[in-house]
Amino acid sequence: MTMPAPILETRRLSKRFGGFLANDAIDFAVAPGEIRGIIGPNGAGKSTLVNLMTGVHAPSSGEVLLAGESLVGLKTHEIARKGLARSFQVSRVFGNLSLIDNLLAPHLAQISGKAGREAGLAKGWRFLELTGLARLAHQPAKALSGGQRVLLQAAAGFMIPSLSCYLLDEPFAGVNPVIKDQLMELIEEENRARALTFVVVSHEMAVMRRLCHKITVLIEGRVVAEGSLDEVAARPDVIKAYLGKSGEVSGEE
């Protein structure tokens, strides 16, 4: 059986900050419709990799490809127009805008006119319902809790019309179990309904076990293992470098 071409791929991707090599010749490929997890200890280069793939940083060498097309040299908004968007570890929303206007903004950045606005409103209300935020639709986003802001920001990414691959960098950090479960359900629903591809960076092993089809492990800027969470958690180098306890790595509660 022929494997589908990757929707997102890096080839020998490296990034230096002065004398520090943050990412070292990373080869990384994600299939269409996959939910891929990236794990690793602090300082492993996970966020740097996400920044390279989304144009926040320029690579020192190597390639980033979306559906076979190079993204190197493009700005973040140009990459988003091509279908690759990302969230940030610190939730970023427009505090003075209402929730529904926060969701409309990324939609109207690509599709304008009356019909475009009506389609955006329909999509926006759907995501507000899915996230449990519909009752707050016309409230300013600055009134939300931290967890609610995470949900709103994630939903705003789904509003990008061209979206085909969504990178989520530590989306579950610091949120309560209810918000965490809502966000996982949102990811799973969009993966099922639209076959969206996801790359999720997280330290939450139980979450990664539930969500991810495959895990990539970064240690000191290099890919050291790929496979299911059980497979990578069984490797002595991962156990030692990542957390030091096999139970924690495997996501056992």
Image (cartoon, helix red, strand yellow):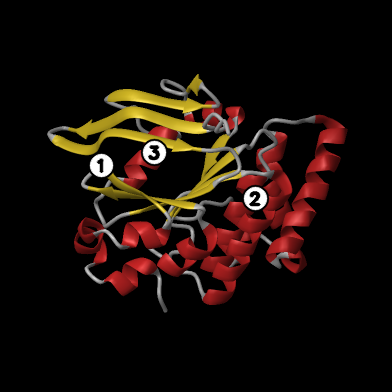
Q: Which residue position is annotated with label 1? A: 222
| Secondary structure beneath label 2 | helix
- The amino acid sitting under disc 1 is Arg
Of the residues under marks 1 and 2, which one precedes in the sequence?
Answer: 2
Mark sitting earlier along the chain (3/1): 3
In the rendered image, residue 153, in percent from the top left (x then y), is placed at: 58, 53
The kind of secondary structure element at disc 3 is helix
Nearer to the camera, 121 or 79: 79
Compared across the picture, whether 37 is left or right of 139 comes to left
In the rendered view, would you say 40 is above or below 28? below
Q: Nearer the viewer, residue 2 or 131?
A: 2
Residue 20 position within the rendered picture, expressed as x and y whole percent measured from the top left? 15, 38
Tag in front: 3 or 1: 1
Mark closer to the observer (2, 3): 2
- Category of crowding for the residue at label 2, using alpha-carbon neighbours closer than 10 angstroms: few (below 14), some (14–19), many (at least 20): some
Q: Please provide percent x and percent y for residue 152.
A: 62, 57
Kind of element beneath mark 1: strand
Q: Are marks 1 and 2 in contact (CB under 8 Å)?
A: no
x 58%, y 38%: residue: 32
Real-space CA distance between mark 2 and mark 3, rounded to the nearest whole angstrom = 23 Å
Q: Amino acid at mark 3?
A: Asn
**Residue receiving disc 3:** 51
Mark 1 → mark 2, Cα distance in angstroms: 28 Å
Label 2 is placed on what type of residue? Answer: Asn
Q: Disc 2 marks which residue? A: 191
- Let me know if residue 214 appears in the view: yes
Q: In the displayed image of the protein, which residue is found farthest to the bottom?
A: 253
Report whether residue 138 is seen: no
